[in-house]
Amino acid sequence: MGNKLIHPSAVIEPGATVANDVIIGPFSYIGAEVILHSGVQIKSHVVVTGKTEIGQESVVYSFAVIGEIPQDLKFKGEKTSLKIGKRNQIRENVTINVGTEGGGGLTSVGNNCLFMTGSHVAHDATIGDNVIIANCGAVAGHCVIEDDVIIGGLSGIHQFVRIGRGAIIGAVTMVTNDVIPFGLVQGPRGALDGLNLIGLKRKGVGRGDITALRAAFQTLAQGEGTFQDRAKKLKEETTSEYVDAITNFILGASDRSFLTPGDFQNG
């Protein structure tokens, strides 16, 4: 390859596209259809395989397996792919799988994400920007995780679940239904317990918008009609872009029902 930054013990299959400044450590394997962009670092004992693209300045740590086939018995070897954006940190023992034909064929990860040790992203999942998945957190197939979401350690996200922008999932939590943007979910069987106020303040969201979000949450929790009815009413009345993000999320297409405030059951 003519790249002095690649350790002699690494295996780079013919056909792989590796930028000149990519660093690849000892005993790592790079498959024939892999694309590694400028500034990528692959530590020792890493497997990157399948039709996988990793964006600029991302770092993959030891014993991670990126781009392997889905853990799905319906997968029959069809050509699917994984696309990972820029400046991601993929820590030790992380697994991220390519997509399936039935799920659209693509698993995608945005920019500036942190996947802590032992975390997993399954086939056909869509991960936004600035997402953090803590140690041993698992995102099942077909999930959509929007920007700025934090998923606590040892938590599991059920297949087809959507987690809205800026939400936070506590540690050791099982999430089986959609989570509204900026929501706070915690408990062994996750319940929507409030808003991610700490995250909102860290993002510099103004007091007026936070007050509007608090009022919106109360309406969703205690208003008249169904959960969707309350969301429709909020949408008609709100002038806050943050409340609008919640109502658009609730009224959008979904394959799951919702975690609703103070209720362990479907919304």
Image: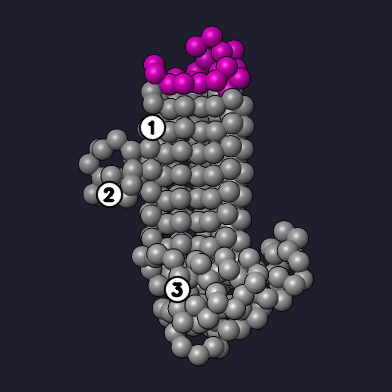
Rendered residue at 65%/72% (across/down):
239
Rendered residue at 28%/44% (across/down):
101
User: Hey, which quadrant is residue 111 in on the image?
Assistant: top right
User: Helix, strand, or loop for circle 2?
Assistant: helix
Give the CA separation, mark 1 to mark 3: 34 Å
Residue range in magenta is 1-22
Q: Amino acid at mark 3?
A: Phe
Report x, y in % for residue 194. 61, 76
254 vs 213, left or right, is left
Report x, y in % for residue 132. 59, 53
Above or below — where is 262 with respect to 9? Answer: below
Q: Which residue is mark 2?
A: 102
Q: Which mark is residue 51?
A: 1
Could you tell me if residue 61 is visible in this image?
Answer: no
Q: Quadrant of the C terminus?
A: bottom left
- Front residue of 119 and 229: 229
* Magenta residue check for 104: no
Rendered residue at 52%/15% (across/down):
8
Q: Amino acid at mark 1?
A: Lys
User: Hey, which quadrant is residue 97 in on the image?
Assistant: top left
Give the CA separation, mark 2 to mark 1: 17 Å
**Contact, CB < 8 Å: mark 3 with mark 2?**
no
User: Helix, strand, or loop for circle 3?
Assistant: loop
Mark 3 or mark 2: whose residue is earlier in sequence:
2
Mark 1 or mark 3: whose residue is earlier in sequence:
1
Local packing at callout 2 (Cα closer than 10 Å; few below 14, some 14-19, many 20+) is: few
Report x, y in % for residue 35. 47, 27
Give the CA separation, mark 3 to mark 2: 24 Å
Above or below — where is 27 with respect to 165? Answer: above
Q: Which mark is residue 258?
A: 3
